[in-house]
Image (cartoon, helix red, strand yellow):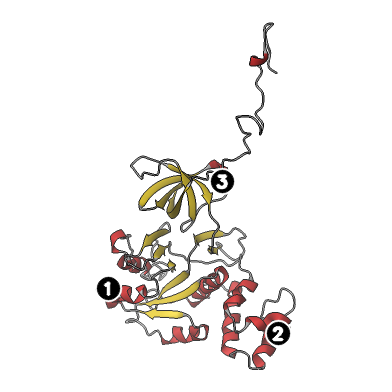
Amino acid sequence: MRRYGKHTDEDDIRSRPNRKGNRPRSNIRPKHEDAAEGMVLTVDRGRLTCLVEDRVVLAMKARELGRKAAVVGDRVGIVGDLSGAKDTLARIVRIEERRSVLRRTADDDDPFERVVVANADQLAIVTALADPEPRPRLIDRCLVAAYDAGLEPLLVLTKSDLAPADELLEMYGALGVAHVVTTREEFVDGLAADRVREYLIGRTTAFVGHSGVGKTTLVNALVPEDRRRTTGVVNAVTGRGRHTTTSALALPLADKEGGWVIDTPGVRSFGLHHVDPSRVIQAFPDLEPGTQGCPRACSHDERDCALDQWVADGHADPARLYSLRRLMSTRERREGD
């Protein structure tokens, strides 16, 4: 309790500020209408590297954003020193509405979602045909995550000189996924990057894949001005590469038509706890109308599913339904199965 002397006046009393006063309450947040628009390029230990016009600016998240975190690909509002000069630090005060969000969980039992990237248009799934061996279950999971996020998938198969791509392509043929098949020699002479680049122009593409498949090597070829350290080493016992990309990074394509490449850390699991089957089915326009007769919360792989009759009536290819159900059931299977 505050004690006052004998001679006090109104100036000795501290009044709590209110909405009509000149000092706002702590829960009244500034609008920052003059904030500049930027794009998050990478996040490292609480510091966010952003592109503001043609300047690279280092920023931190403002306290008023609370637990809301900005991720690579986010469009944000930034205030403060936007010069990009050394030892300057701006503040991110607003995260704009995202048009797409690619998420994953650590495993299928983990309810905590991790946002991989925001505002991407396409997901490039990079996998080697040998050394290390392809993991179809991981590809399935990445496809489900892409469909759930509304991203267009692109399958990039590397090291085709070590093993043929026919079997893997046949597995995903019914899905109609765009694909590029490359050899190790094409990685060296740049032909692989040129062929992949055709699918990237004017789009923001996130690259995912487990370590050792050549993902970061491909990104380096696509954006040679910003090379990232690559591994090139695959463990002889586990058949898996060592992680060298530890954080996601957005890089601009050196092309007059524009486009962004987002390199992400190598993944060894891709949990799908967050996936809503109703969003995945939207990626199958030939099958989606047939779900009108499905029971509520139908998994589309049960006895009363209306898709069986829809296909039997000739409205869609049975191979498409098989592919959908294989993808949907991937939550019950581990990637290495």
Left or right: 296, with 264 as reference point: right
According to the image, label 1 marks what residue?
A: 190
According to the image, label 3 marks what residue?
A: 65
Instruction: Give the structural element (helix, strand or loop) at label 2.
Output: loop
Left or right: 50, with 97 as reference point: left
Q: Residues within 10 Å of mark 1 (few under 14, many from 20)?
A: few
Which one is earlier in the sequence, the residue at label 2 or at label 1? 1
According to the image, label 2 marks what residue?
A: 306
Q: How crowded is mark 3: few (under 14 residues within 10 Å), some or many (20 or more)?
A: some
**How far is mark 2 from mark 1, CA to CA?**
48 Å
As drawn, 17 above or below 297: above
Residue 289 seen by the camera: yes
Q: Quadrant of residue 279?
A: bottom right
Which one is earlier in the sequence, the residue at label 2 or at label 3? 3
Q: Which of 40 and 167 is in front in this view?
A: 40
**Quarter of the picture holding the N terminus:** top right
Q: Which of 225 and 297 is in front in this view?
A: 225
**At 66% across and 18% down in the image, what residue appears?**
13
**At 56% across and 88% down in the image, what residue appears?**
319
What is the three-letter code of the residue carrying label 1?
Answer: Gly
Q: Quadrant of residue 297?
A: bottom right
Left or right: 8, with 183 as reference point: right
